[in-house]
Image: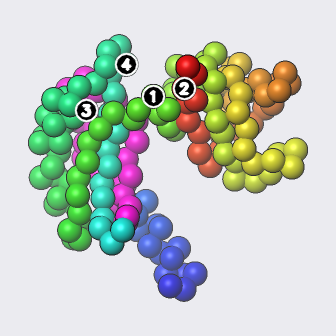
């Protein structure tokens, strides 16, 4: 696949994710759940739409995921021409951190951050969230505070501590 085709496919996937998110957000509000993440990807020759949901104040159950899936299935199906599998689940204990609100909510918790560009010759950092605002995340990494702009974060998730 050429570089241009790959870039167009990524833009197309991002657009589909955006449309899915717009369609399912009212259902999430109706059911009192938060949308953690939406993925649209190909895995092993099959296409998947993966929606991760949670409650802010209690555990999400299999029944909650099934109810959400049943309510959004037709709308999501109408947005995508390809055959795909719809999966709705909890984000898990090492949940991704996507929005500023996620970082605020988990202040004091240990996270793993993967950066788009190197900072101090590294792209991967583990540390405890010290503070955050609309543009900047501060983590404690190896007894030092590290300031990271959100636009530099490629991926971030909680680290489960036993």
Q: Of the residues under marks 4 and 2, which one precedes in the sequence?
A: 4
Q: Of the residues under marks 1 and 3, which one precedes in the sequence?
A: 3
Q: How packed is label 1: few (under 14 Cα within 10 Å), some, or many (20 or more)?
A: few
Q: Which residue is mark 2?
A: 160
Element at label 3? helix
Q: How packed is label 4: few (under 14 Cα within 10 Å), some, or many (20 or more)?
A: few
- The span shown in magenta is 16-43
Instruction: Give residue 91's quadrant in the image.
Output: top left
Q: Is residue 20 magenta?
A: yes
- Up the image or down, 158 lies above or below 42; here it is above
x and y percent of residue 26 in the render? 23, 36
Q: Of the residues under marks 2 and 1, which one precedes in the sequence?
A: 1
Disc 2 from disc 1: Cα separation: 6 Å
Q: Which residue is mark 3?
A: 28
Instruction: Give residue 110's quadrant in the image.
Output: top right
Residue drawn at (33%, 28%) of the image: 54
Disc 1 from disc 3: Cα separation: 20 Å
- Contact, CB < 8 Å: mark 2 with mark 1? yes
x and y percent of residue 29 in the render? 25, 28
**Left or right placement of residue 68 versus residue 37 in this view:** left
Q: Which residue is mark 1?
A: 93
The foreground one among 85 and 17 is 85
**In which quadrant is the C terminus drawn?**
top right
Instruction: Give residue 3's quadrant in the image.
Output: bottom right
The foreground one among 16 and 44 is 44
Disc 4 from disc 1: Cα separation: 13 Å
Q: Which residue is mark 4?
A: 56
- The residue mark sitting in front, 3 or 2, is 2
Element at label 4? loop
């Amino acid at each position: 696949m050429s570089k241009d085709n790959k870039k167009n496919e990524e833009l197309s996937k991002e657009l589909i994710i955006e449309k899915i998110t717009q369609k399912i957000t009212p259902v999430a509000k109706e059911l009192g759940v938060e949308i953690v993440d939406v993925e649209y990807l190909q895995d092993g020759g099959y296409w998947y739409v993966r929606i991760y949901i949670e409650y802010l104040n209690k555990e999400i159950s299999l029944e909650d995921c099934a109810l959400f899936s049943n309510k959004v299935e037709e709308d999501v199906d109408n947005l995508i021409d390809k055959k795909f599998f719809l999966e709705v689940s909890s984000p898990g204990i090492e949940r991704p951190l996507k929005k500023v609100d996620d970082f605020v909510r988990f202040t004091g918790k240990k996270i793993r951050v993967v950066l788009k560009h190197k900072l101090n010759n590294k792209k991967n950092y583990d540390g405890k969230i010290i503070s955050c605002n609309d543009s900047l995340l501060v983590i404690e990494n190896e007894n030092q505070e590290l300031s990271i702009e959100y636009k530099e974060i490629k991926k971030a998730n909680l680290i489960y501590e036993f």
